[in-house]
Image (tube, helix red, strand yellow):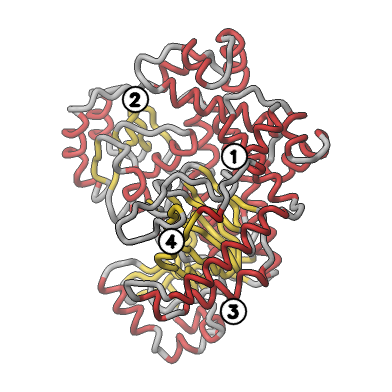
Amino acid sequence: MLDEKIRDGQEQELPDWGELAFRLLSVQAVKGTDEMHLPQQLVLTYALIVVTGGTVQLQADTGLLELAAGSVSLCMPGQTFGTVEQSGSLEMYIFYFNVYRYGAADEGSRPLKDVQLLPQSGLLAQIPMQSILTVCSELAQKEEMQQRRVSFRAQIAFQELLHSIRVSGRQRPRDTNYALEQAKQYIEDNFTRDLTAQSLAQAAEFSPKYFNDLFKRKYGKSALDYAAELRLQQAKRLMAESGAKLREIAHQVGYADEFYFSRKFKKMIGVPPAVYMKSRRRKLVAYSSSLLGQLLPLNLMPYAAALHPKWTEYYYRNYRTEIPVHISAYRSKQDWQANLEILRQVPADLILAEDSLLAEEKAALERLAPVHYLSSEPADWRSQFLELAERLGESWQAAQWLANFDREAGQAREQLHAQIGSESVVVIRMLHSKLYLHCSRSMASMLYQELQLQPAYTGGGGVYNIPVTPEDIAAIGADHLLMLIRRESDTLNEWSRLQNDLQWLKIPAVQRHRVHFLASDPWREQSAYAQLRMIRETRHLFLSHSSIHVP
């Protein structure tokens, strides 16, 4: 039975801990505001992750877990984990330890790597805070943690922590969010199996209707729709691989009948699989840097793109290894001939570019491959995104992404309004020693439309760049200043000087430590993916109560 399979990860027979020995190696305390980030890391030992404050999304291998205070997750040797995002002031402890067979924990013995100590699912039931907070704090603060060996007393305290988690894990108090997260995780791990709404609900110990309502309310879609979406996403990835046959792809994603799969695919995606397979194998070129932010939400990775470690820092850091050919995103108006020389070596099927290019540059591009131009000044980022999606046969994917985007924007809007109410904001741009009231099209779209924050300045027609003095800024009376400071030496030196300027110090927002820093990436980019990043950064800025003094 499927419900038994789901419970296998929760109620499986676990080893007798009396046969095992545990050796704590080190403790890592992770504390900070929403701007803190724990990079993805590979663990060669066991890693017990305990959250004692705030909430965090943990990327454990390919799974995404939501951990709140009292939540515990265990990573096995050879797995990876890192934080994705958080809310509130995070307090998290990571215990790195080895496991041995009893009596074999001497210096020459080999630690065990594959003993399943706790339920297989990455997320464990919440445990009483009283049971873990004191032990975690004591262990992390001990001076011995900085030395080569952990003290004997710390080893005992760690055993007590493990025992508390073991006992609480057996009790597993009823928690709706935990049950839903377990169900979602199971779907992600088993979406190619024959899942039914009834079996999933039964495994989560809910009635089918109640389970479906809860799941849809939390994730924006039914459990089976989510499974179908995962199947199609996997199918689309397989279709990009040369040599993959439709029948093989259908079987690999869980459809025994390739004809049923084809009908399902066409109904949900809008085009037959054969047409889509052909389109995915096209070599796309994102000639303008912002277009990469329109392609990523469509799960399309270009063969060539405009990248630079500073001017497109986020894309360069995260996607440069996945994009075979890089053209320059720096001084593109001067370097366009060098970029075209690179593209002459690329068998491009379609070049995507903004329509603001010089006529000579356009003519040269069109001699290389078909070119699709998009407006460099779209009425809004959505119109360009939907236009591009339609051109590439990805309208269904765009609709799905926008639905998720709107849901996240709505949640952020509610959180921000609950936190800052009607407090006003204004963006101040600094270039060398000059200050400007500033609002780009992307900023206006995000801050004042999507998130519905209160603008302190309502002139300028929504998009403006107006020179101001510190006295002018004080007169506006904004509750929060969002600083967009050019990251080069002259401007940064002027920013350091400005922070000691008497007129600057008279600004109410400065006196209340409500000065926040914005980076040009993503705040000056007009794309779907940049808008999503802006939502998350805005939430981090305001919900963490952070103020800054240097960018």
CB atoms of marks 1 and 3 within 8 Å:
no
| Residue at which label 2 appears | 350
Label 2, residues with CA under 10 Å away: few <14, some 14-19, many ≥20: some
Q: Which amino acid does label 1 sit on?
A: Leu
CB atoms of marks 4 and 1 within 8 Å:
no
Q: On residue 477, which mark appears?
A: 3
Q: Which residue is drawn at 26% across and 29% down?
A: 365
- Name which of mark 4 and mark 2 comes first in the sequence: 4
Using the rendered image of the protein, determine whether residue 541 is visible from the camera's viewpoint. Answer: no
CB atoms of marks 4 and 3 within 8 Å:
no
| Residue at which label 4 appears | 96
Residue 135 percent coordinates (x, y): 57, 73
- Name which of mark 4 and mark 3 comes first in the sequence: 4
Q: Which residue is drawn at 45% across and 44% down?
A: 114
Q: Which amino acid does label 2 sit on?
A: Leu
Q: Which residue is drawn at 48% across and 68% down?
A: 30
Label 3, residues with CA under 10 Å away: few <14, some 14-19, many ≥20: some
Distance CA(mark 4)–CA(mark 3): 50 Å
| Residue at which label 1 appears | 402
Q: What residue type is labelled 4?
A: Tyr
Q: What element carries label 2?
A: strand
Label 4, residues with CA under 10 Å away: few <14, some 14-19, many ≥20: many
- Name which of mark 1 and mark 2 comes first in the sequence: 2
- Name which of mark 2 and mark 3 comes first in the sequence: 2
Residue 358 percent coordinates (x, y): 28, 38
In which quadrant of the rendered image does the C terminus lie?
bottom left
